[in-house]
């Protein structure tokens, strides 16, 4: 789900809200209770919910092995193609 940023035009309070794309924009400021909250254009942020999402799903190259270990191994682990060359 997208994470939207809002700023109040009355009190300059800034906040983030997790909303569906189809949800109506928020208008009531939680700080001053005025209906002057406006959506800010910012970098896209989203949350992956549910099972099946892994840290390496959207990484490539050397960034793929971020959980630790030796970065010179190329992220292939101890298995790989070197054990299958005997056929």
Image (cartoon, helix red, strand yellow):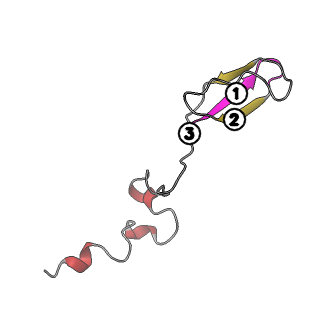
The Cα atoms of the two marked residues, 1 and 3, are separated by 16 Å
Image coords of residue 20 (percent x, y): 57, 33
Locate residue 45, reporting x and y percent.
Answer: 57, 38
Q: Closer to the camera: disc 2 or disc 3? A: 3
Q: Which residue is mark 3?
A: 1
Q: Secondary structure at mark 1?
A: strand
Write the residue at 60% across / 27% down. 23
Residue 10 as seen in the image, left or right of residue 15: right
Residue that badge 2 annotates: 16
Earlier sequence position, callout 1 versus callout 3: 3
Nearer to me, 32 or 87: 32
Q: Residues within 10 Å of mark 3 (few under 14, many from 20)?
A: few
Q: Report if the CB atoms under discs 2 and 1 are less than 8 Å apart.
A: yes
Local packing at callout 1 (Cα closer than 10 Å; few below 14, some 14-19, many 20+) is many
- State how far apart marks 2 and 1 are (Cα): 6 Å
Q: Do the residues under discs 1 and 3 have CB atoms within 8 angstroms?
A: no
Does the magenta run of residues contain 39? no
Q: Quadrant of residue 46?
A: top right
Quadrant where the N terminus sits is: top right
Q: Earlier in the sequence, mark 2 or mark 3?
A: 3
Q: Is residue 21 above or below residue 65?
A: above
Residue 60 is left or right of residue 4, and the answer is: left
From the image, tell me which residue sits under label 1.
6
Find out whether residue 11 is within the magenta segment. yes
């Amino acid at each position: 789900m997208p994470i939207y940023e809002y700023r109040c035009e009355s009190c300059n309070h800034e906040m983030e809200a997790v909303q569906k794309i189809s949800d109506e924009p928020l208008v009531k400021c939680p700080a001053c209770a005025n209906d002057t909250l406006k959506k800010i254009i910012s970098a896209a942020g989203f949350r992956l919910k549910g099972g099946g999402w892994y840290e390496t799903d959207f990484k490539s190259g050397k960034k793929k092995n971020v959980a630790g270990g030796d970065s010179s191994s190329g992220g292939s682990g101890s298995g790989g193609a070197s054990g299958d060359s005997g056929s």
